[in-house]
Amino acid sequence: MTPFVTHRHRSNMQYTVLVLALVALLPFTTSYPTSAGTCIASPDPIAAVGAMGTLAPTLPITLTATQTNTSTTVTLNGTGTFAGLLLYAAPTIDAQQHVGTWKVDNALYKTLDGGPETLDCTGFGRSSTLSHASPAPKNFPVEFTLEGAAGVKVWGVVVVSAEVGFRAVESGVV
Protein backbone atom coordinates (compact mmCIF):
# COMPACT_ATOMS: atom_id res chain seq x y z
CA MET A 1 0.00 0.00 0.00
CA THR A 2 2.85 2.40 0.69
CA PRO A 3 4.19 2.25 -2.91
CA PHE A 4 0.74 3.34 -4.19
CA VAL A 5 0.68 6.36 -1.87
CA THR A 6 4.24 7.29 -2.88
CA HIS A 7 3.39 6.95 -6.58
CA ARG A 8 0.23 9.02 -6.14
CA HIS A 9 2.16 11.67 -4.20
CA ARG A 10 4.77 11.80 -6.97
CA SER A 11 2.03 12.17 -9.64
CA ASN A 12 0.44 15.03 -7.71
CA MET A 13 3.84 16.70 -7.34
CA GLN A 14 4.54 16.35 -11.08
CA TYR A 15 1.09 17.75 -11.86
CA THR A 16 1.69 20.72 -9.53
CA VAL A 17 5.07 21.47 -11.15
CA LEU A 18 3.49 21.29 -14.62
CA VAL A 19 0.67 23.67 -13.63
CA LEU A 20 3.14 26.15 -12.11
CA ALA A 21 5.29 26.04 -15.25
CA LEU A 22 2.27 26.70 -17.46
CA VAL A 23 1.11 29.58 -15.28
CA ALA A 24 4.59 31.11 -15.43
CA LEU A 25 4.49 30.99 -19.24
CA LEU A 26 0.98 32.44 -19.48
CA PRO A 27 2.02 36.11 -19.88
CA PHE A 28 4.23 35.21 -22.82
CA THR A 29 1.41 33.45 -24.65
CA THR A 30 -1.49 35.77 -23.87
CA SER A 31 0.00 39.24 -24.16
CA TYR A 32 -1.62 40.15 -27.47
CA PRO A 33 -1.92 36.98 -29.52
CA THR A 34 -4.87 37.39 -31.88
CA SER A 35 -6.90 40.35 -30.64
CA ALA A 36 -7.21 42.93 -27.92
CA GLY A 37 -8.53 41.65 -24.62
CA THR A 38 -10.90 44.60 -24.13
CA CYS A 39 -13.45 46.64 -26.06
CA ILE A 40 -12.61 49.95 -24.33
CA ALA A 41 -9.32 51.90 -24.53
CA SER A 42 -9.36 53.15 -20.95
CA PRO A 43 -5.74 52.86 -19.70
CA ASP A 44 -6.47 51.69 -16.14
CA PRO A 45 -7.92 48.24 -16.99
CA ILE A 46 -5.25 47.75 -19.66
CA ALA A 47 -2.44 48.60 -17.23
CA ALA A 48 -3.83 45.92 -14.90
CA VAL A 49 -2.85 43.32 -17.52
CA GLY A 50 0.87 43.08 -16.78
CA ALA A 51 1.70 41.47 -20.11
CA MET A 52 0.81 44.73 -21.87
CA GLY A 53 3.53 46.58 -20.03
CA THR A 54 2.97 49.88 -18.31
CA LEU A 55 1.27 53.01 -19.54
CA ALA A 56 3.93 54.99 -21.42
CA PRO A 57 2.34 58.34 -22.37
CA THR A 58 5.56 59.68 -23.92
CA LEU A 59 5.85 56.94 -26.56
CA PRO A 60 6.11 58.74 -29.93
CA ILE A 61 2.82 57.44 -31.34
CA THR A 62 0.13 59.65 -32.88
CA LEU A 63 -3.38 58.97 -34.16
CA THR A 64 -4.98 61.16 -36.82
CA ALA A 65 -8.41 60.91 -38.40
CA THR A 66 -9.13 62.74 -41.64
CA GLN A 67 -12.65 62.96 -43.06
CA THR A 68 -13.02 62.40 -46.80
CA ASN A 69 -16.20 62.56 -48.91
CA THR A 70 -17.40 59.09 -47.94
CA SER A 71 -15.21 57.84 -45.11
CA THR A 72 -12.55 58.65 -42.52
CA THR A 73 -8.89 57.75 -42.97
CA VAL A 74 -7.36 56.82 -39.62
CA THR A 75 -3.55 56.81 -39.43
CA LEU A 76 -1.27 55.59 -36.64
CA ASN A 77 2.23 57.04 -36.83
CA GLY A 78 5.22 56.01 -34.78
CA THR A 79 8.69 54.56 -35.13
CA GLY A 80 9.65 50.92 -35.46
CA THR A 81 7.05 48.26 -34.79
CA PHE A 82 4.18 47.55 -32.44
CA ALA A 83 2.52 44.35 -31.24
CA GLY A 84 -1.16 45.15 -30.85
CA LEU A 85 -3.86 47.77 -31.05
CA LEU A 86 -7.46 48.62 -30.29
CA LEU A 87 -9.33 51.37 -32.18
CA TYR A 88 -12.93 52.63 -32.20
CA ALA A 89 -14.88 55.83 -32.83
CA ALA A 90 -17.11 57.18 -30.05
CA PRO A 91 -18.06 60.44 -28.35
CA THR A 92 -16.12 59.44 -25.18
CA ILE A 93 -13.43 56.87 -24.33
CA ASP A 94 -15.84 54.80 -22.23
CA ALA A 95 -18.91 55.05 -24.50
CA GLN A 96 -21.04 51.91 -24.60
CA GLN A 97 -21.74 52.41 -28.32
CA HIS A 98 -19.00 52.62 -30.95
CA VAL A 99 -19.74 54.47 -34.19
CA GLY A 100 -19.01 53.49 -37.78
CA THR A 101 -17.76 50.41 -39.59
CA TRP A 102 -14.09 49.53 -40.09
CA LYS A 103 -13.09 48.28 -43.56
CA VAL A 104 -10.32 45.71 -43.12
CA ASP A 105 -8.32 44.33 -46.05
CA ASN A 106 -5.18 43.17 -44.24
CA ALA A 107 -4.69 39.82 -42.48
CA LEU A 108 -2.89 41.55 -39.57
CA TYR A 109 -6.12 43.29 -38.43
CA LYS A 110 -9.77 42.43 -37.81
CA THR A 111 -12.95 43.72 -36.23
CA LEU A 112 -13.88 42.30 -32.84
CA ASP A 113 -17.09 40.55 -33.83
CA GLY A 114 -16.49 37.28 -31.97
CA GLY A 115 -15.44 33.95 -33.41
CA PRO A 116 -12.39 31.77 -32.77
CA GLU A 117 -9.78 33.56 -30.63
CA THR A 118 -11.61 36.88 -31.02
CA LEU A 119 -13.21 39.02 -28.35
CA ASP A 120 -16.88 39.80 -29.07
CA CYS A 121 -17.46 43.56 -28.99
CA THR A 122 -20.66 43.46 -31.08
CA GLY A 123 -22.56 44.86 -28.09
CA PHE A 124 -20.77 48.14 -28.92
CA GLY A 125 -21.77 47.86 -32.61
CA ARG A 126 -21.03 45.32 -35.34
CA SER A 127 -17.63 45.86 -37.05
CA SER A 128 -17.14 49.03 -34.99
CA THR A 129 -14.12 47.92 -32.91
CA LEU A 130 -10.80 47.23 -34.65
CA SER A 131 -7.88 45.17 -33.33
CA HIS A 132 -4.87 43.18 -34.42
CA ALA A 133 -5.31 39.62 -35.70
CA SER A 134 -1.75 38.38 -35.31
CA PRO A 135 1.08 38.51 -32.76
CA ALA A 136 3.49 39.34 -35.60
CA PRO A 137 5.23 42.74 -35.31
CA LYS A 138 3.43 45.46 -37.28
CA ASN A 139 5.18 48.44 -38.87
CA PHE A 140 4.33 52.11 -38.46
CA PRO A 141 2.71 53.96 -40.13
CA VAL A 142 -0.53 52.06 -40.60
CA GLU A 143 -3.72 53.36 -42.19
CA PHE A 144 -7.33 52.23 -41.80
CA THR A 145 -10.69 53.21 -43.30
CA LEU A 146 -13.70 53.93 -41.11
CA GLU A 147 -17.12 54.51 -42.66
CA GLY A 148 -20.16 56.17 -41.11
CA ALA A 149 -18.50 58.09 -38.28
CA ALA A 150 -18.95 61.83 -37.77
CA GLY A 151 -18.89 64.15 -34.77
CA VAL A 152 -16.84 61.70 -32.68
CA LYS A 153 -13.19 60.99 -31.85
CA VAL A 154 -11.24 57.84 -32.65
CA TRP A 155 -9.90 56.32 -29.42
CA GLY A 156 -7.24 53.67 -29.16
CA VAL A 157 -4.47 51.86 -27.41
CA VAL A 158 -1.22 50.77 -29.06
CA VAL A 159 0.92 48.13 -27.35
CA VAL A 160 4.57 48.28 -28.40
CA SER A 161 5.69 45.36 -26.19
CA ALA A 162 5.50 44.17 -22.60
CA GLU A 163 8.96 45.67 -22.00
CA VAL A 164 8.29 49.07 -23.63
CA GLY A 165 4.63 49.43 -22.68
CA PHE A 166 1.52 50.89 -24.27
CA ARG A 167 0.10 54.28 -25.11
CA ALA A 168 -3.49 55.50 -25.19
CA VAL A 169 -4.18 57.66 -28.27
CA GLU A 170 -7.07 59.76 -29.52
CA SER A 171 -7.82 61.78 -32.62
CA GLY A 172 -9.49 65.11 -32.96
CA VAL A 173 -13.22 65.15 -33.70
CA VAL A 174 -14.09 63.79 -37.16
Image (tube, helix red, strand yellow):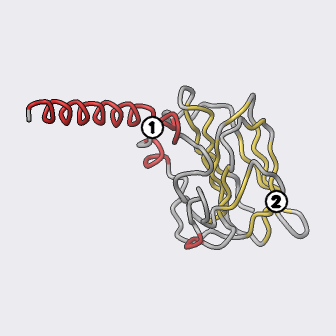
Vertical side of 75 occupied by 163: above or below: above
Across and down, in percent, residue 64 comes to 76, 49
Vertical side of 159 occupied by 17: above or below: above
Residue drawn at x 57%, y 27% as measured from the top left: 164
- Which one is in front in this view, the residue at disc 1 or the one at disc 2? 1
Q: Which mark is residue 95?
A: none
Marks 1 and 2: CB-CB under 8 Å?
no
Q: Residue furthest right?
A: 69
Say which amino acid is labelled 2. Thr
Across and down, in percent, residue 96 comes to 52, 70
Q: Which mark is residue 26?
A: 1
Instruction: Label 2, secondary structure: give it.
Output: strand
Residue drawn at x 80%, y 39% as measured from the top left: 141
Say which amino acid is labelled 1. Leu
The answer to whether 110 appears left or right of 47 in the picture is right
Q: Quadrant of residue 13?
A: top left
The answer to whether 108 appears left or right of 13 in the picture is right
Real-space Cα separation, disc 1 to disc 2, in angstroms? 34 Å
Residue drawn at x 41%, y 35% as measured from the top left: 22
Vertical side of 60 occupied by 98: above or below: below
> Is 114 or 123 nearer to us in this picture?
114
Instruction: Label 1, secondary structure: give it.
Output: helix
The quarter in which the N terminus is drawn is: top left
Q: Which mark is residue 145?
A: 2
The answer to whether 146 appears left or right of 26 in the picture is right
